[in-house]
């Protein structure tokens, strides 16, 4: 269903460009593909598609809002005198603050080692560990221990999940969320990884080769910061 919606959106965009070109050819209007704010609209569509495909989360919603405001600034008069980047930064901080409040008052769901057969999509159920840090540093070391899944988050700080020397159970899922910080995941060399990643003004880096028959499934989200997955 989501793929169909994505195809419809892309179809509308392509068809609209075609209509603009035809109207330009017959003199109905002066159409230019590179209209004012076209790049912001294009990136807004990219993030809208990400919201539809992956569901709304902090990173793709922030991207959608950022480029939506940059596009709107070209056509909405009261936004002309506003420093849009300061506005965007303020909105991002507000959303992050609300996210931290919700996380504090809402019981966390833990990550399970569950996954649909033949699919790279894996999700949350009820088994696993939880770790987080805000405006600080944190580390979880699994040397000599068993890792069956976990969810670790970082905001305005740095966090390390060290799985070197760990016994990783079959189908284990590791979920990592980062905002305005840095998260490092360390694995034994040769560990097979399946990675699902999302980044908004941030990065998720893994220098190894992904494998469908993975020892561990990693889902990493990063905004205004970095997530690094390394093997040693």
Image: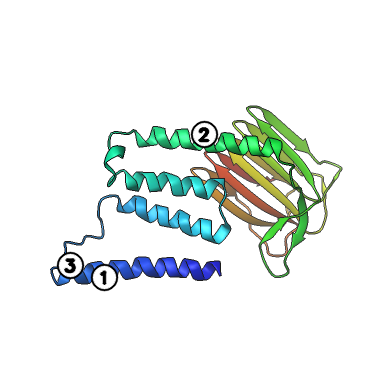
Q: Nearer the viewer, residue 67 or 94?
A: 94
Identify the secondary structure beneath mark 3: helix
Residue 104 drawn at (x, y percent) = 69, 35
Task: Give whichever of discs 1 and 2 has the lower sequence position.
Answer: 1
| Residue at image point 34% right, 68% down | 14
Q: Is residue 166 shown left or right of residue 31?
A: right
**Residue assigned mark 2:** 93
Identify the secondary structure beneath mark 1: helix
> From the image, which quarter does the N terminus lie in?
bottom right
| Residue at image point 30% right, 50% down | 37
Q: Is residue 192 shown left or right of residue 166?
A: left
CA–CA distance in space, label 1 to label 2: 40 Å
Residue 87 drawn at (x, y percent) = 41, 34
| Residue at image point 63% right, 35% down | 100
**Residue assigned mark 1:** 19
CA–CA distance in space, label 2 to label 3: 43 Å
Q: Is residue 9 shown left or right of residue 18?
A: right
**The furthest residue to the left:** 27
Identify the secondary structure beneath mark 2: helix
Number of marks in the rendered image:
3
């Amino acid at each position: 269903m989501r793929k169909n919606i994505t195809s419809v959106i892309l179809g509308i965009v392509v068809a609209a460009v075609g209509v603009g070109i035809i109207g330009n050819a017959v003199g109905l209007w002066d159409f230019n593909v590179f209209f004012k704010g076209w790049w912001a609209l294009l990136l807004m569509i990219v993030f809208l598609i990400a919201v539809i495909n992956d569901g709304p989360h902090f990173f793709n919603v922030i991207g959608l809002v950022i480029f939506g405001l940059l596009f709107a600034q070209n056509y909405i008069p009261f936004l002309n005198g506003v420093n849009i980047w300061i506005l965007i930064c303020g909105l991002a901080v507000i959303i992050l603050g609300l996210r931290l409040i919700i996380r504090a008052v809402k019981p966390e769901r833990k990550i399970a080692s569950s996954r649909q057969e033949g699919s790279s999509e894996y999700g949350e159920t009820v088994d696993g560990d939880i770790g987080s840090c805000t405006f600080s540093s944190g580390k979880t070391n699994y040397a000599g221990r068993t890792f069956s899944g976990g969810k670790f988050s970082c905001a305005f700080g740095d966090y390390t999940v060290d799985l070197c020397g760990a016994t990783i159970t079959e189908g284990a899922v590791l979920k990592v969320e980062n905002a305005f910080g840095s998260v490092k995941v360390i694995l034994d060399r040769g560990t097979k990884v399946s990675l699902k990643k999302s980044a908004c003004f941030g990065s998720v880096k893994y220098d190894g080769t992904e494998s469908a028959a993975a020892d561990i499934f990693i889902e990493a989200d990063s905004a205004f910061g970095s997530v690094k997955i390394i093997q040693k």
